[in-house]
C-alpha cells in the first residue's frame, strides 16, 4: 500500500498518523504539503488531526479549500481511499466528500478522553478487519466533534450502512451517536476518534491497529 | 468599499453557544431573555466601487468559504 | 498599580540616579522605558538574585544551566531535555483565558528557541477559595486558555496540579512548564556574534498589546486592577505552531547564529540580551519592524509584548534560506538591523535616532538588592485529639472536597495524548512521555505544598523538592534536574522576603542532598492585593529519566492478591495536614519535617525495586497520607484494598503526612521486607489488594463505586454551580 499524509498549516497529528501507517504497512509514508497542486501516485490519503488554520472561521474550512484538496477530491472520485481523522473529518465534510457538519461539542468544552465505540459496519476497506458489533476503545480529543446532519441524511446514512462507528458514551452530542461515516462509494471514511493513538500497547491500547492493518493488507 | 457579512447558525441547527449565552443571561437576572443565537461577523474592505459587483463577489465568498451552507445562513451588508 | 515609582517610568530614585550617571544626560522617553523594563523585577531579578545564586546549578548531566531561555540536561542517546517553568499570574488574573494561553505560548517559545521540539506541557494552578465570587470564572477561563493554546499547537498537556486557598482570592498563580527534546550537540543559544550580521524579526506583527507587561508583573494589585485590561496580550496559537515548525526547520540548516524569543519587555529585552551576551552592539531601524497598527511610537514598538515573535541573528547568506523557510510557513520576516562593534544599542525611526544606550554599563549597572528580611517564626504545635472511630467519614470529606477531589474536569480539557508518546498522562505521580522512536522515557512532575511553606519556609522548600523527586522515583525514574517557579508576595515586606529566603534555603539543601540541580526558573514577586499576599509557593518542576519503559510502574492497582507494603517511617504527623484542614477546618502546627537522608535512602530503594521488576504498583504518600494514597491507587486500578495493621487504627497513622514514604503493591512482600531491612529502610506489610471496596482494619469500609462517585463529583458540580 502506498500512503500519503497531507500536512496543512496547523496539522498536529500528521506525524502520529505516519508512525501508525508505517508500522502497519512496513514502508515509508510520504508527507504532502497542502500547497502542492497534485498528489503523488497513492492508494491512500490521510487527512490528519490538528488545528489546520487554527480552527479559525470553522474547523477544516480553510484547509478544505487548499490547493491539494482539489486533487484529493478527484482522487477520491477515482476510488483512492481517503481517511480523515478528527480535523481531517472536519475537512472532509467541509469539502463535501462526506455529508453533514461537525459543530461545537454540546458541553462547549474541549474533551480529551478514551471513548467506547461500536463497529457498525465491516463493509469498507477501513473496517473489514473488525467484527460487526465489536466494541473498541480509542481516545477523542476535540472541541468540535458534534456530528450534525438533516434527518433525511441521517436516515440515508443508516439505510445505506454508511455509519462506520457509533459512540457508546457520546462525548459531544453527535446525532445518532455518530463517530464515523463513509461516503457512498465506501472509499472515504471520516471519524472523530483517533485510531492512530490506539495502535501501540505502551500507549494503553491497540484497538485502532486493525484499521491500519486492514488498509495495508 | 466596506462590507459586512453576518453568519448565523441556521434555524433548527443546535446552537450550544447561543443556548449557553441565554442561560448565562437568565442567571444574571435578565428574565426577559427567551432565546439567543450566536453567530459571527466578518468585516471586509473591498477594492470595488460597484455595489452590485461587490454584492455578487460577497455572495460567492460566502458560498465558497465564509459560511457552511449545511449549518449556516449568511446576510451581506454593504456600507 | 502601586509598587515601583511612577515618576521615573517605574524606576526607584536611586535607580534613576544611576541612569543619569551611565548616560551623562537625561534619558528620553524611549530610553527611560528601556531602562525601566530591563531593570524591572521581572527582567532583572533584582530582589532575588542574591539568593538564587545559592542554589546548586551544576551536575554532570547539565548541558545548560540558568541564564538562557531554558535549562538543558543530557538524557543519553545524543539527546537533551530542555525545560523551564514560567508564571503568568498577573495577566491571568486580569484576563484568565488570554493570560493563561499566552503563558503557555511563552514557555513553549523558551523551549523551541533552544532548538528543542516541545514534547510536553505541565501546569501548576492556585486559585482562591472555591466559594469566592471570582474563583469559578477564573478557574474555567485559565483551564480553557491553557487547553486553547496547548491543544492547538499539538503539544500534550500531561500533568500538573491545582489547589484552592483564600490567600489566592486576589492573586491567582498560573505557572506553566514546557519540556522539549533536542539533539544534544545542536542546542541554540542567544549570544549574538559576527559584526555586520543581520538581526531578523519573524512572526506576528507588533501591536500595542502588553505594553508594560514586565513592569506590571513587578507591582502589586490594588482594586484598580480591572482597569489594566487593555495591556493584556492576545495569544495566536496557530501562528505559535507555525513558528515552532518554521524555527525547527531553519535550525536544521546552518543559517542561525543566535536566537531569542520576544517575551517580557519584547524587542527591548530580546535585542538587548543578545547583544549583551555577545559583547556587541546592535543597530535597529524601527521602521522595518512589522507593525499591526499605524502611528506606533518607538516606545510602543520597543516595549510591546505582542505574542508569537522571535528575534534572530543570521549568518551572512542565511537570509535567503530563512526567507524561504518562513515564506513556506506563511510567516512575516524582516531584517530590522545589524550587529555592530560599538557596544551600544542604537535605535532609529523615521530617519531619526530615537535611543542610544551603552549596553555593558546598562547590564552591569542592573540593580541588585539585599532586601531586609525576617525569619518566619516557628509555628506553634497544634493540639490535635482526633476522633479515631470512623476514618471513612474523613476520607469522604477529603476526596469529595476541593482539596482532594479528582481534577479530571481540568485535564480532560487538555489534549494529553497528541504526539503519540504519552505513556502515563495526568492523574498519576509523574507523567511519563516516551522519547520518540526509542524505548526510553522522561518522567515529569510539578509540586509544591504552599501550606507547609507558610508555616515553615525552610521545611516547605525542602519538601517541594523532595516531593517532586519522590514523584519521579515512584514511576521508576532517575531524577535528573529541576526548574522552579518562585511565587511570593511583596519582597519589600521583610516577612515576605523572609519566606523567600527560607524557601530558597530549603530548596537548595534538598537539591544538594538529592543530586538535582536547578537548571532554569522564574521568579514572580508582588503577588499580593491590598497587603494580602499569596501563600509562599515555590513550585518545583522536575524531570527524570526512564532508561527502559518496560521497567516502570504506575499507581493503579493491577489486580487482587497483591501485598501492600508501606516504605518509610510513619510517626503520624498531623500538623498542617490535609486532614486537619479538610476535616477540622484548621491550618495549624508545623509541617512534617523532611529527613533528606531518609528521602534519599527510601527513594533509592524503591527505584531499585521497581527497576528489578518487583513492584506492581507504587504511589508516593503526600497530601492526605496513607489512606488517601491507598484510595487513589484503588480508584486508578478499579481494584479494592484492605489495610490491616495497628498503624491504621488511628487517624494519625491513616492521615499523617510524614515524608519519604511510598505505598507499594508487590507479589513477594517477604523478600522486599528483607531487602529493605538490609538497606536500612523502614518497610511494613500493611494489607492486600482485592475486592470492590477500601477497608481499614476490618471495621470500616467504603465501596469503590461510592468513593469514585464522590471523588469525581465535586469539581464538575462546583463549576456548574456558577
Image (cartoon, coloured by chain):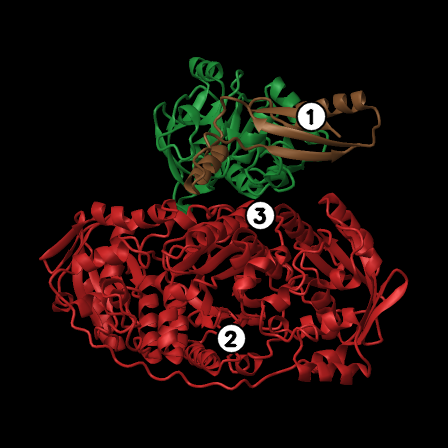
Subunit bearing disc 1? B
Task: Kindly identify which residue carries mark 3.
Answer: C153
Q: Which mark is residue C33?
A: none
Which residue is the extreme one toward the left? C699
Chain letter matching colour red: C
At horizontal 31% and vertical 70% (from top left) the residue drawn is: C605
Q: Secondary structure at mark 2?
A: loop
Q: Nearer the viewer, mark 3 or mark 1?
A: 1
Residue C197 horizontal side relative to residue C128, left or right: right
Q: Circle 3: is it few (<14), some (14-19), or many (20+) Cα within 10 Å?
A: many
Chain letter matching colour green: A
Compared to residue C657, the image places residue C560 above or below, namely above
Compared to residue C22, the image places residue C194 above or below, namely above
**Residue C665 visible within the image:** no
Front residue of C668/C380: it is C380
Q: Secondary structure at mark 3?
A: helix
Compared to residue C372, the image places residue C718 above or below, namely above
The colour chain B appears in is: brown
Task: Kindly identify which residue carries mark 2.
Answer: C490
Task: Kindly identify which residue carries mark 1.
Answer: B76
Amino acid at each position: 500500500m502506498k500512503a500519503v499524509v497531507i500536512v496543512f498549516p496547523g496539522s498536529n497529528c500528521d506525524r502520529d498518523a505516519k508512525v501508525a501507517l508505517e508500522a502497519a504497512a512496513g514502508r515509508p509514508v510520504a508527507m504532502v504539503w497542502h500547497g502542492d497542486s497534485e498528489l503523488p501516485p497513492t492508494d491512500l490519503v490521510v487527512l490528519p488531526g490538528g488545528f489546520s488554520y487554527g480552527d479559525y472561521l470553522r474547523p477544516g474550512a480553510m484547509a478544505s479549500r487548499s490547493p491539494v484538496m482539489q486533487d484529493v477530491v478527484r482522487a477520491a472520485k477515482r476510488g483512492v481511499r481517503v481517511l480523515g481523522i478528527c480535523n481531517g473529518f472536519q475537512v472532509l465534510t467541509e469539502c463535501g466528500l462526506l455529508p453533514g457538519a461537525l459543530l461545537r461539542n454540546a458541553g462547549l468544552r474541549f474533551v480529551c478522553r478514551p471513548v467506547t465505540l461500536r463497529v457498525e459496519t465491516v463493509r469498507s476497506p477501513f473496517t473489514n478487519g473488525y467484527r460487526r458489533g465489536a466494541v473498541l476503545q480509542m481516545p477523542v480529543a476535540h472541541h468540535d466533534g458534534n456530528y450534525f446532519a438533516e434527518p433525511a441524511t441521517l436516515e440515508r446514512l443508516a439505510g445505506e450502512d454508511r455509519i462506520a462507528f457509533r459512540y457508546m458514551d457520546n462525548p459531544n452530542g453527535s446525532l445518532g451517536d455518530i463517530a464515523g461515516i463513509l461516503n457512498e462509494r465506501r472509499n472515504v471514511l471520516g471519524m472523530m476518534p483517533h485510531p492512530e493513538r490506539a495502535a501501540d500497547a505502551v500507549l494503553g491500547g491497540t484497538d485502532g491497529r486493525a484499521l491500519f492493518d486492514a488498509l495495508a493488507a | 468599499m466596506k462590507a459586512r457579512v453576518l453568519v448565523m447558525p441556521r434555524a433548527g441547527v443546535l446552537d450550544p453557544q447561543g443556548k449557553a449565552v441565554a442561560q448565562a443571561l437568565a442567571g444574571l437576572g435578565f428574565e426577559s431573555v427567551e432565546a439567543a443565537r450566536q453567530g459571527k461577523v466578518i468585516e471586509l474592505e473591498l477594492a470595488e466601487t460597484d455595489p452590485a459587483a461587490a454584492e455578487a463577489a460577497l455572495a460567492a465568498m460566502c458560498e465558497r468559504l465564509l459560511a457552511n451552507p449545511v449549518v449556516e445562513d449568511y446576510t451581506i451588508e454593504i456600507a | 498599580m502601586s509598587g515601583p515609582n511612577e515618576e521615573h517610568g517605574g524606576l526607584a530614585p536611586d535607580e534613576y540616579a544611576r541612569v543619569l550617571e551611565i548616560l551623562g544626560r537625561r534619558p528620553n522617553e524611549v530610553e527611560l522605558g528601556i531602562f525601566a523594563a530591563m531593570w524591572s523585577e521581572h527582567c532583572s531579578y533584582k530582589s532575588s538574585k542574591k539568593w538564587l545564586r545559592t542554589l546548586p546549578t551544576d551536575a554532570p548531566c547539565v548541558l545548560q544551566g540558568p541564564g538562557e531561555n531554558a535549562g538543558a540536561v543530557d538524557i543519553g542517546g545524543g539527546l537533551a531535555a530542555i525545560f523551564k517553568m514560567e508564571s503568568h499570574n498577573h495577566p491571568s488574573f486580569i484576563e484568565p483565558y488570554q493570560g493563561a494561553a499566552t503563558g503557555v505560548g511563552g514557555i513553549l517559545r523558551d523551549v523551541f528557541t533552544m532548538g528543542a521540539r516541545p514534547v510536553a506541557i505541565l501546569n501548576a494552578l492556585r486559585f482562591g477559595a472555591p466559594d469566592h465570587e471570582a474563583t469559578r470564572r477564573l478557574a474555567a477561563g485559565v483551564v480553557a486558555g491553557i487547553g486553547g493554546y496547548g491543544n492547538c499547537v499539538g503539544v500534550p498537556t500531561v500533568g500538573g496540579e491545582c489547589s484552592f486557598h483564600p490567600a489566592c482570592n486576589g492573586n491567582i498563580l498560573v505557572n506553566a512548564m514546557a519540556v522539549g527534546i533536542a539533539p544534544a550537540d545542536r542546542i541554540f543559544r542567544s549570544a549574538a556574534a559576527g559584526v555586520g550580521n543581520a538581526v531578523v524579526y519573524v512572526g506576528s506583527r507588533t501591536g500595542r498589546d502588553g505594553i508594560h507587561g514586565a513592569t506590571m508583573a513587578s507591582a502589586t494589585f490594588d482594586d484598580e486592577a480591572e482597569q489594566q485590561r487593555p495591556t493584556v496580550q492576545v495569544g495566536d496559537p496557530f501562528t505559535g505552531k507555525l513558528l515552532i515548525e518554521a524555527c525547527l526547520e531553519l535550525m536544521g540548516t546552518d543559517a542561525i547564529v543566535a536566537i531569542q524569543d520576544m517575551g517580557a519587555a519584547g524587542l527591548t529585552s530580546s535585542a538587548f540580551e543578545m547583544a549583551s551576551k555577545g559583547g556587541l552592539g546592535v543597530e535597529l531601524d524601527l521602521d522595518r519592524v512589522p507593525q499591526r497598527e499605524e502611528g506606533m511610537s518607538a516606545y510602543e514598538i520597543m516595549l510591546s509584548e505582542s505574542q508569537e515573535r522571535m528575534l534572530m541573528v543570521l549568518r551572512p547568506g542565511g537570509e535567503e534560506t530563512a526567507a524561504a523557510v518562513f515564506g513556506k510557513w506563511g510567516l512575516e520576516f524582516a531584517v530590522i538591523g545589524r550587529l555592530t562593534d560599538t557596544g551600544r544599542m542604537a535605535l532609529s525611526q523615521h530617519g531619526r535616532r530615537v535611543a542610544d544606550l551603552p549596553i555593558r554599563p546598562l547590564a552591569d549597572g542592573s540593580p541588585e538588592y539585599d532586601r531586609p528580611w525576617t525569619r518566619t517564626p516557628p509555628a506553634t504545635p497544634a493540639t490535635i485529639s482526633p476522633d479515631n472511630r470512623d476514618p471513612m467519614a474523613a476520607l469522604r470529606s477529603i476526596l469529595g472536597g476541593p482539596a482532594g477531589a479528582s481534577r479530571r474536569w481540568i485535564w480532560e480539557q487538555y489534549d494529553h495524548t497528541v504526539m503519540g508518546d504519552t505513556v502515563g498522562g495526568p492523574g498519576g505521580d509523574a507523567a511519563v512521555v516516551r522519547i520518540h522512536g526509542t524505548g526510553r522515557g522522561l518522567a515529569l512532575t510539578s509540586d509544591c505544598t504552599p501550606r507547609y511553606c507558610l508555616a515553615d519556609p525552610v521545611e516547605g522548600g525542602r519538601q517541594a523538592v523532595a516531593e517532586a523527586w519522590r514523584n519521579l522515583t515512584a514511576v521508576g525514574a532517575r531524577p535528573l534536574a529541576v526548574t522552579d517557579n518562585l511565587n511570593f508576595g511583596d519582597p519589600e515586606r521583610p516577612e515576605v522576603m523572609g519566606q523567600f529566603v527560607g524557601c530558597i534555603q530549603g530548596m537548595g539543601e534538598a537539591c544538594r542532598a538529592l543530586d538535582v540541580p536547578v537548571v532554569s526558573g522564574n521568579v514572580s514577586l508582588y503577588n499580593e492585593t491590598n497587603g494580602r499576599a499569596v501563600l509562599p509557593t515555590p513550585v518545583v518542576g522536575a524531570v527524570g529519566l526512564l532508561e527502559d519503559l518496560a521497567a516502570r510502574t504506575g499507581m493503579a492497582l493491577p489486580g487482587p492478591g497483591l501485598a501492600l507494603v508501606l516504605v518509610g517511617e510513619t510517626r503520624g504527623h498531623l500538623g498542617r495536614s490535609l486532614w486537619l484542614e479538610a476535616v477540622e477546618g484548621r491550618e495549624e502546627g508545623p509541617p512534617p519535617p523532611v529527613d533528606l537522608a531518609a528521602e534519599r535512602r527510601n527513594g533509592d530503594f524503591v527505584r531499585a525495586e521497581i527497576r528489578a521488576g518487583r513492584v506492581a504498583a507504587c504511589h508516593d504518600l503526600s497530601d492526605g497520607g496513607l489512606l488517601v494514597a491507598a484510595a487513589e491507587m484503588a480508584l486508578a486500578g478499579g481494584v479494592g484494598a484492605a489495610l490491616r495493621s495497628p498503624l491504621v487504627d488511628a487517624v494519625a497513622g491513616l492521615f499523617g503526612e510524614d515524608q519519604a514514604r511510598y505505598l507499594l503493591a508487590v507479589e513477594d512482600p517477604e523478600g522486599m521486607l528483607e531487602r529493605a531491612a538490609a538497606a536500612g529502610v523502614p518497610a511494613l506489610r500493611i494489607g492486600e489488594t482485592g475486592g470492590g471496596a477500601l477497608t481499614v482494619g476490618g471495621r470500616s469500609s467504603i465501596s469503590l463505586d461510592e468513593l469514585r462517585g464522590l471523588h469525581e463529583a465535586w469539581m464538575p458540580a462546583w463549576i456548574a454551580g456558577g
